[in-house]
Image (tube, rainbow, N blue to C red):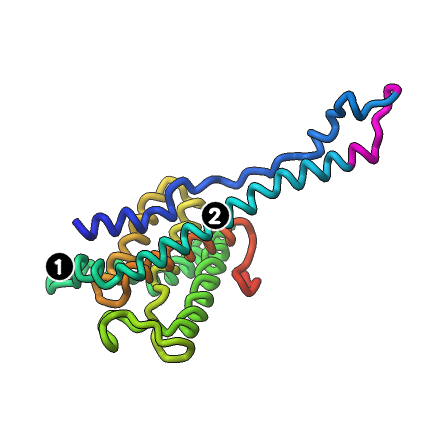
Amino acid sequence: MPAHLCTVVLCLPLIGQARDCPPPRASLLANRQPAALLGTGTAQPRRAGSLQTHMRGRNQRPGRRDRRRQALTLGLATAALILADRDAHDLIGTNADGADAEVSQWVQTFGLETGAASVVGLYLLGDDYDRTTAKTAATAAASAALTVETLNLLTGRQRPREGSGRGDFRGPFSGGQSFPSGHTAIAFSLATVYGQRYPKHEWAFDALAVGVAVARMREDKHYLSDVFVGALMGTYFGHRALKGKGGLFGFRF
């Protein structure tokens, strides 16, 4: 049961992913001149331009406010998960021997070895569409990996089996590599790109990404907050790459 609840939480970043929609066209609104702006049958360009600028500003402000609310909500959710990490980790448990461990070991390779092999295979064996997909996926995964490494260096969080076993944040350059989960970030970045480029198989890519997150916790490598933040980061960089944008450092293939 705890594993199922964890799966639901990790699916949140993938629920309701909206397709890119063009921004509202303020120019169309500006062309519809109100009666107050009309003189003797001719429009007043200066006032029309002011109306256009005003409408553009009104259309942009709600978007910024929404992003701030989302960032605040995700920040509070992450903080709550960090406080509950130890209890959640005890409930989820760790891998037992046998088939469960073998499946876990295989699934989490999608967050590194198998995922990297899929990118190389698409580029070398695919057509132009597949090669474009491979470049996009590589950009997303590299952006996620670089950001994860940076946060690992800055936070220095210990893994569940390290130190006191409480997931202490030891600070910059202390050696901890738990927060956030790199495997999870890469898996979700690849799943986001592949799911959009090959929509018929989106469910399978999402399932693999969630499987990687669960496996990393079951392998006693990460806490719930680690994989939650990794999933958010991977999804974010996946969507950026699909829009033709690079990571935080502007790098892209």
Using residue 42 as the reference point, say whether residue 28 is left or right of it.
left
Q: Quadrant of the C terminus?
A: bottom right
Magenta residue check for 186 = no
Most extreme residue toward the right is: 40
193 and 69: which is toward the camera: 69
Residue at the disc numbered 2: 69
User: Looking at the image, is mark 2 or mark 1 earlier in the sequence?
Assistant: 2
Amino acid found under the numbered disc labelled 2: Arg
What number is the disc on residue 99? Answer: 1
Magenta residues span: 40-49
Residue neighbourhood size for the residue with mark 2, other residues' Cα within 10 Å, grouped as few (<14), some (14–19), many (≥20): few
Q: Residue at x 44, y 45 (%)?
A: 196
Taking the spot 42% from the left edge, 58% from the top edge, the residue there is 119
Residue at (23%, 63%) from the top-left corner?
A: 86
Question: Does residue 162 appear left or right of residue 56 in this picture?
Answer: left
Q: Position of residue 96 (x, y in %)?
A: 12, 63
Does the stretch in magenta take in 46? Answer: yes
The quadrant where residue 76 appears: bottom left
Mark 1 nearby-residue class (10 Å; few <14, some 14–19, many ≥20): few
Calculate the distance from the C-alpha at mark 2 to the C-alpha at mark 1: 43 Å
- In the image, residue 95 lies at what x, y percent? 16, 63
Tag of residue 63:
none
Reply above or below: 230 against 192.
Answer: below
Picture layout, residue 205 above or below residue 160 = above
The amino acid beneath tag 1 is Ala
Q: Give SS at disc 2.
A: helix
Q: Secondary structure at mark 1?
A: helix
Give how far across and how far down residue 46 sits, in percent.
Answer: 83, 35
